């Protein structure tokens, strides 16, 4: 009886999975096609002859390793900064009483409703005044502060029992020692989830690097991929090859942290 009730749900999940997988499968097949094959109508599913020419064209056109180094450096700085700031702010909003806490947190939540593009002018002015244009820190500094990350960590700290915190205080621990040695280690799943989400946003960021690196000396991989799209035509096999290569690091990171990622999302989103 239970199987009869659940088969429509399973069927719906299978259909949704197929819809999600088809674009990735089409991307992989496009990598091995030629440009005339991609433009053919009706489209062909399988390439007539598998070729690695698109990968050769991508690596010869895009300075992959220099852009990869910029993307990796920006990701590490942004993730480390955002995790540190969000964890400290989330703990303060969840566990430390201070005047105006709820009002200030409400302002943080209100920032989620504002399009991020509206902050670009102010962020650019700040980076310019600091003399950081065309540098790696300029790519990462604005991404170190996130209202969503603060909200996520606050929910994680709210869901923790207070017994450990009270025991640590009775043993003479100060607030920072309670945070660092007792409460923060218990939020590892949420920290992993925040790491994956922040890394994904940092790796795919395109608009901000174009603004703060006008000379192109410190531009990440998304800018290189965007440069493969021409005004009058696009070499789609090369573009798909580049997108496939650039997505591999994120896929590996997600595979390593997927269990902690799902545990963090499931345990810190709604309570409180």
Image (tube, helix red, strand yellow):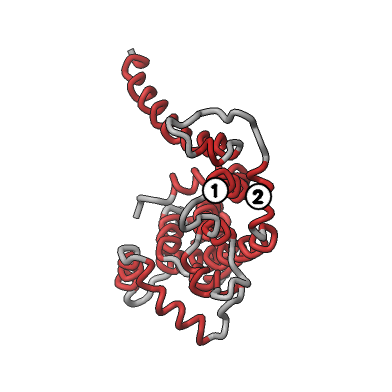
Give the secondary structure at mark 1: loop
263 up-or-down from 17: above or below: below
Task: Please state the horizontal and vertical placement of residue 93, each as a whole percent of the image.
Answer: 40, 67
Foreground pick, 195 / 264:
195
At x 55% / y 38%, what residue is drawn?
A: 30
Task: Please state the horizontal and vertical placement of residue 70, each as a whole percent of the image.
Answer: 63, 65
* Outermost residue to the top: 1
176 up-or-down from 250: above or below: below
Q: Is residue 35 left or right of residue 123?
A: right
At x 45% / y 83%, what residue is drawn?
A: 125
For the residues bearing labels 2 and 1, Cβ distance under 8 angstroms: yes
Foreground pick, 180 / 23:
23
269 up-or-down from 124: above or below: above
Q: Name the image quarter holding residue 95.
A: bottom left
Disc with the residue nearer the chain's start (2 vs 1): 2
Residue neighbourhood size for the residue with mark 2, other residues' Cα within 10 Å, grouped as few (<14), some (14–19), many (≥20): some
Foreground pick, 11 / 28:
28
Q: CA distance from mark 2 to mark 1?
A: 10 Å
- Residue 228 appears anywhere in the view: yes
Mark 2 highlights which residue? 57
Q: Which quarter of the rendering shows the N terminus?
A: top left
At x 48% / y 68%, what residue is drawn?
A: 208
Q: Name the image quarter holding residue 60.
A: bottom right
Give the secondary structure at mark 2: helix
Task: Please state the horizontal and vertical placement of residue 206, each as a whole percent of the image.
Answer: 49, 62
Task: Please state the horizontal and vertical placement of residue 109, each as a whole percent of the image.
Answer: 33, 65
Foreground pick, 152 / 180:
152
Residue neighbourhood size for the residue with mark 1, other residues' Cα within 10 Å, grouped as few (<14), some (14–19), many (≥20): some
- Residue 183 appears anywhere in the view: no
Q: Which quarter of the rendering shows the C terminus?
A: bottom left
Mark 1 highlights which residue? 235
Q: Is residue 102 left or right of residue 221?
A: left
């Amino acid at each position: 009886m239970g199987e009869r009730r659940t088969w429509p749900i399973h069927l719906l999940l299978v259909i949704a999975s197929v819809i999600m997988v088809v674009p990735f499968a089409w991307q992989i097949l496009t990598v091995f096609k030629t440009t005339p094959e991609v433009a053919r109508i009706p489209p062909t599913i399988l390439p007539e002859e598998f070729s690695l020419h698109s990968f050769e064209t991508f690596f010869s056109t895009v300075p992959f390793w220099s852009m990869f180094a910029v993307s990796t450096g920006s990701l590490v700085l942004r993730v480390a900064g955002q995790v540190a700031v969000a964890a400290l702010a989330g703990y303060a909003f969840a566990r430390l009483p201070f005047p105006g806490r709820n009002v200030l947190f409400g302002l943080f939540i209100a920032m989620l409703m504002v399009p991020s593009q509206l902050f670009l002018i102010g962020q650019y002015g700040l980076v310019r005044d600091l003399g950081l244009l065309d540098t790696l820190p300029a790519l990462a500094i604005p991404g170190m502060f996130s209202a969503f990350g603060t909200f996520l960590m606050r929910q994680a700290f709210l869901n923790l029992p207070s017994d450990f915190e009270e025991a640590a205080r009775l043993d003479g621990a100060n607030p920072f020692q309670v945070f660092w040695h007792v409460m923060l280690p218990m939020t590892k799943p949420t920290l992993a989830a925040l790491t994956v989400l922040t890394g994904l946003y940092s790796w795919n960021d395109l608009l901000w690097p174009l603004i703060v690196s006008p000379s192109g000396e410190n531009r990440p991989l998304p800018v290189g991929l965007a440069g493969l799209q021409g005004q009058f035509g696009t070499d789609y096999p090369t573009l798909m090859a580049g997108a496939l290569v650039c997505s591999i690091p994120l896929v590996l990171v997600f595979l390593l942290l997927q269990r902690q990622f799902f545990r963090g999302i499931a345990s810190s989103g709604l309570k409180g």
